[in-house]
Image (cartoon, rainbow, N blue to C red):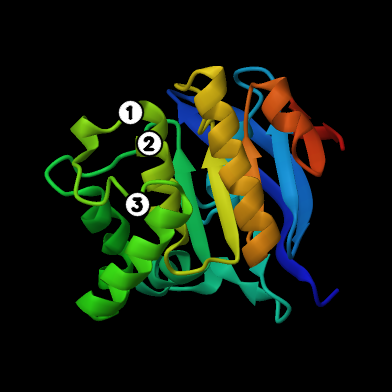
C-alpha cells in the first residue's frame, strides 16, 4: 500500500538479566498509514514503551524488521550516522518529560533540530516562531523552560518535534505529568497537527480518555498486541 509509512514485521525484544533472558516484546507486526492516529494502551510492563522505542528506531529489536515509506526502506540496514539523520528528518518524539534545554528560550529549543539538520538560523527562527504561535505560545517565545507551566513546556516540546515536518510523531506518556485541562490542550494540538499537516500520530498512554480521542486503539498485553 502506497500510504503505509511504517511497517513493523515480527518485532521481538529481549533483555539479559544475569543468565536469564527476559522477553519484553513478542512478535509484534504493525502497519501505520499516512494520517494515522493511534494509541497503544496496556498495563505497566506490557512492553508499550519498548515497542515505541523500536518503532521510532531508537532501539534495535532482537529479531524482526522495520520498514519506512512506500519504498519499504529497511531502517536497520542504515549505519548509525544514517539512522540519526533519518530520525531527525522523518520522525518526531515527545516524552513524559519534555527534555527542554533549561538555558535556552522556547524559541531556541524549538530551533535545535532544524539547526542540527543544516537549516540556516533565520529560516529556523522563522519556522520555530510560526510553530510556537500555532501552539498558542506566541507571547512566550523568549521565555526559558523554568518560566513556563508544565503544559506550556510540553507544547514547546511538540513544536520542537515537528519543526522538520516529520511523517510520524511518537509520544510516550506525554500527558502523564499534566492535569486534565493541560492534557486536553496537548491532545487538541496533536489532533490539529494530524488534521492540518497530515502528521501521523502514535502514542503510548495509560489514560483512557486520551486513547479514546485517537482513531485507533491497540491494546498490548505480555509483549503482544491483543486487539485494535
- Farthest residue, direction left: 103
Which residue is at the front of the view, 130 or 82?
Answer: 130
From the viewer's perspective, tell me whether residue 54 is left or right of residue 66.
left
Do callouts 3 and 1 mark residues in contact (Cβ within 8 Å)?
A: no
From the viewer's perspective, tell me whether residue 19 is left or right of residue 98.
right
- Farthest residue, direction front: 139
* Quadrant showing the C terminus: top right
| First-in-chain label (3 vs 2) | 3
Residue under numbered circle 3? 138
Number of marks drawn: 3
Residue appearing at x 41%, y 75% in the figure: 82
Which residue is at the front of the view, 142 or 98?
Answer: 142
- Tell me the number on the disc at residue 186: none
From the viewer's perspective, tell me whether residue 60 is left or right of residue 138.
right
Q: Is residue 16 above or below residue 214?
A: above
* Quadrant showing the N terminus: bottom right
Badge 1 density bin: few <14, some 14–19, many ≥20, Cα 10 Å: few
What's the CA distance linking mark 3 and mark 2?
11 Å
Badge 3 density bin: few <14, some 14–19, many ≥20, Cα 10 Å: some
Tell me the element at label 1.
Answer: loop
Which residue is at the front of the view, 30 or 18?
Answer: 30
Residue 19 at x, y = what percent?
47, 24
From the viewer's perspective, tell me whether residue 136 is left or right of residue 112.
right
- Tell me the number on the disc at residue 149: 1
Q: Is residue 14 above or below residue 179?
A: below
Residue under numbered circle 2? 152
Choose mark 3 or mark 1, whichever is in front.
3
Residue 142 at x, y = what percent?
19, 50
Residue appearing at x 70%, y 35% in the figure: 40
Instruction: Give the image quarter of residue 153.
Output: top left
Instruction: Give the image quarter of residue 31.
Output: bottom right
Mark yes or no: residue 154 visible.
yes
Amino acid at each position: 500500500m502506497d500510504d503505509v509509512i511504517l511497517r513493523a514485521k515480527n518485532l521481538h525484544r529481549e533483555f539479559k538479566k544475569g543468565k536469564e533472558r527476559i522477553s519484553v516484546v513478542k512478535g509484534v507486526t504493525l502497519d501505520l498509514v499516512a494520517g494515522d492516529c493511534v494509541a497503544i494502551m496496556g498495563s505497566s510492563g506490557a512492553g508499550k514503551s519498548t515497542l515505541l522505542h523500536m518503532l521510532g528506531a531508537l532501539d534495535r529489536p532482537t529479531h524482526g524488521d522495520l520498514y519506512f515509506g512506500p519504498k519499504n526502506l529497511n531502517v536497520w540496514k542504515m549505519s548509525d550516522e544514517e539512522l540519526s539523520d533519518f530520525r531527525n528528518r522523518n520522525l518526531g518524539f515527545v516524552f513524559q518529560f519534555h527534555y527542554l534545554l533549561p538555558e535556552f528560550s522556547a524559541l531556541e529549543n524549538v530551533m535545535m533540530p532544524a539547526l542540527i539538520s543544516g537549516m540556516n538560523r533565520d529560516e529556523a527562527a522563522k519556522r520555530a516562531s510560526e510553530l510556537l504561535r500555532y501552539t498558542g505560545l506566541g507571547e512566550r517565545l523568549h521565555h526559558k523552560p523554568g518560566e513556563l507551566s508544565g503544559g506550556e513546556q510540553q507544547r514547546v516540546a511538540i513544536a520542537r518535534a515537528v519543526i522538520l515536518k516529520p511523517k510520524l510523531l511518537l509520544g510516550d506518556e506525554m500527558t502523564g505529568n499534566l492535569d486534565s485541562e493541560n492534557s486536553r490542550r496537548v491532545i487538541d494540538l496533536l489532533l490539529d497537527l494530524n488534521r492540518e499537516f497530515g502528521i501521523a500520530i502514535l502514542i503510548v498512554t495509560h489514560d483512557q480518555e486520551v486513547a479514546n480521542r485517537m482513531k485507533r486503539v491497540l491494546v498490548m498485553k505480555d509483549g503482544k498486541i491483543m486487539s485494535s
